[in-house]
Amino acid sequence: MRRRQFIGLVGGAAAWPLDVGAQRAARARRVGVLMALSEKDNDSQDILTAFREALETLGWMVGTNLAIDYRSNLVDGERARLAATELLALSPDVVLAISKMALQGLLAITRAVPLVFTFVAEPVAQGLIENVERPGGNLTGFSHVPATTGKKWVDLLREIAPRVTRIGFITNPLAGTLGDLFFETIQRAAAESSVATVLVKIHEPSDVNRALAAFSRDGNSDGGLIVGADDFTLMHRRLIFDLAKRYRLPTAASDRTYVTEGALLSYGINSDEHVKQAATYVDRILRGEKPADLPVKEADEFELVINMKTARALGLTVPPTLKMEADEVID
């Protein structure tokens, strides 16, 4: 139902009329949303519905005192800048950037319009903000999983798939320093269990099959995979997990979105709750606060999601204690 409710709201660029009564004299405020995935993607619809509903609880009603404009499907940096330009031309009061690519596209165009980012990991290490307490400039937001989460992915993968003696970390080098930060953590954690690590680099969708075929050693069952938390792997998650299934690679990732596409497990933030938090900052900015004065919130609550169908397909037995620990078990 949430997705059906959302479909009628996306894509519009026109302002809606103000409600009658006390709000008649007020100007409808305008919020922009820029995101890497297509707004038609099922997971995107869930996230955007959660965002809109959170704004409603804070008193912002689409069609009454609020208009929301969307731009999405950022296949590369050039498309991100073009979409950001289109969105900013609509004169939003504040823009929600969902992903690093979206944020960079906006920052290339404006240093004045207030920006709230989400799903951006390690924003200080990536040079996007100076510090979390006072981010400065025109942006603030909510960071994604920290690089230290790499240890948890290794531990969980090994607990469900103890046969794994090699772990590949798949990432796009164009993600910048982010992949290196996560891989360093994964290497240290794997070394504690005498597990080898391999950096699996992909630049284009056509690279994925070649890279996973090489890593899997023609179907050797000792390999496991961890998917980097970058825009490229998110946008091509279906391809990655279809091929991981073909090569029988148990896979850990950062978000439930990956598990619904076939990953064995995810450990990371709850996407809906993450974007609901972002709505509170959008609300505060609409009411007059400056983004530079709002500290960036680092993720501190995480959820474990396990895909039992994938576990069975791989011949793996999930320990009962881990099933009880999981926040969600997909069967």
Image (cartoon, rainbow, N blue to C red):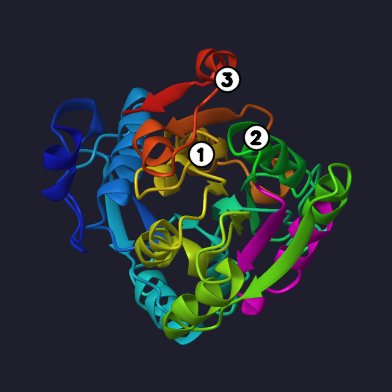
Sooner in the amino-acid sequence: mark 1 or mark 2: 2
Foreground: 28 or 230?
230
**Magenta region, residue range:** 164-185
Q: Can you give x and y, in whole percent of width and height, for residue 63 in the image?
A: 17, 42
* Element marked by disc 2: helix
Tell me the residue that label 3 is attached to. 322
Neighbours of disc 1 within 10 Å: few (<14), some (14-19), many (20+):
many
Tell me the residue that label 1 is attached to. 265
* CB within 8 Å, label 2 to label 3: yes
Sooner in the amino-acid sequence: mark 2 or mark 3: 2
Is 14 above or below relative to 328?
below
Please state which amino acid type lies under the numbered disc 2.
Answer: Leu
Report how far apart the C-alphas of labels 2 and 3 lie in the structure: 9 Å
Left or right side of 317 for 63: left
Neighbours of disc 3 within 10 Å: few (<14), some (14-19), many (20+):
some
Q: Is residue 182 magenta?
A: yes
Q: Can you give x and y, in whole percent of width and height, for residue 174 in the image?
A: 63, 79
Tell me the residue that label 2 is attached to. 156
Q: Residue at x 50, y 43 (%)?
A: 255
* CB within 8 Å, label 1 to label 2: yes
